[in-house]
Image: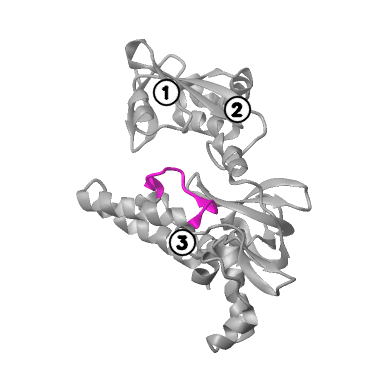
Amino acid sequence: MHRRLTAGQSVSATGFAREYELSDRTVKRDIERLRDFHRAPIVWDAAARTYRYTAPFDLLTGLRLDADEALAVVLAGRTFAAWEGTPLGRILTTTLEKIARFTGAAASLPAADLRAVLHPEDAILDSAEQRHFATLLNAIIARRELVINYQKPGVPRPELRAVRPLHLAYLDHRWMLVAEDTTRAGWRNFLLSRIHAISALGQRFTPPPSERIKDYLAGSLGRFTGGTEFEVRLRFDATAAPYVRERPWHASQGLRDLPGGALEATYRLNNLIDVSRRILASGGHVEALAPAELRSSLAAEIAVMARAYAPEITGVALKKITPKKVRAGHLVSRSTR
């Protein structure tokens, strides 16, 4: 069928079915797959009662993995960790990258080299993620609206949300669905692990350009997104600086050397929630320099923590607290007299 359409011929579903001894339903299903899954420019000519291509189309470059195959690629990548850094590992990684692009813009990983799936501890899917990944990816590719039974933290029971699934992103070690929430008239992020059930509405929708989704996620450090862009400046001490060089916190990271081995890092982020958590987890090894809102929120959080640890703080007030080392990527400190 593709060869005929590429040659400029029109195809009658009934005639094609009769020629190849197929049912009309099978041929129409194949036509739908060309149009919906492979994005072929196939249209129905009502006057001639035939199908035709409106533009040249290369089926090979348009091939996509189906949802189960895409999930298999992600999971298989985790087995490559043993060969990371070796010639075989580099070949496997390159192969994975070539295969992964056939999922189109439906799913994304945080790094072009698929680093997240090369480290098993960073890429473990829980049961809900495994159960829902294929269904959601299929709906994104087919552009079908869904109803998800979703439970937010602190809410006693899950609630039904009608959504238009747009993209699956691997952020902060968890898979997240970016979707248009039709009941709330806006884009929302849904963790797959919090989805209890999924059902199809059947209606089709026209997704936004992939560039808009890319822009939506560009300023996210973790799972949160926002509509305001912030220029965040952080000062890392000499203990933390080498680790920030090795593993940047965000794609927008810019570095400037400071005296004594310290670093000043600049980021462009669309929210301050995730970076605040990173800073608090890093303890005294990092200081937020800007924006003022970030410093104020950190000061308020630290004040609450200080009240909780007031007795201990009083007991060590005269001790000198010295950052000693970074172990396993977590910044720690040890007090000395």
Q: Distance between the residues labelled 1 and 3?
A: 40 Å
- Is the residue marked by circle 2 packed among few (<14), some (14-19), or many (20+) residues within 10 Å? few
Residue plotted at (26% across, 52% down): 91
Can residue 162 be seen here? The reply is: yes
Q: Which residue ends up furthest to the left in the rendered image? A: 87
* Sequence-earlier tag: 1 or 3: 3
Q: Does the magenta stretch include residue 251?
A: no
- Is the residue marked by circle 3 packed among few (<14), some (14-19), or many (20+) residues within 10 Å? many
Look at the image and give the residue range highlighted in magenta: 103-116
The image shows residue 161 at horizontal and vertical percentages of 73, 57
Residue named by callout 3: 70
Residue named by callout 2: 301
The image shows residue 312 at horizontal and vertical percentages of 49, 26
Mark 1, secondary structure of its residue: helix
Q: Inspect the image, locate mark 2, and give the three-letter code of the amino acid beneath it.
A: Glu
Q: How far apart are marks 1 and 2 (CA)?
A: 17 Å
Residue plotted at (42% across, 43% down): 111
Quarter of the picture containing the C terminus is: top left
Tag nearer the camera, 1 or 2: 1
Q: Nearer the viewer, residue 133 or 263?
A: 133
Q: How far apart are marks 3 and 2 (CA)?
A: 41 Å
Q: Inspect the image, locate mark 3, and give the three-letter code of the amino acid beneath it.
A: Ala
Dot 3 and dot 2 residues touching (CB under 8 Å):
no
Residue plotted at (56% across, 18% down): 290
Residue named by callout 1: 285
Q: Inspect the image, locate mark 1, and give the three-letter code of the amino acid beneath it.
A: His
Residue plotted at (76% across, 53% down): 182
* Sequence-earlier tag: 1 or 2: 1
Relative to 337, is 162 on the left or the right? right
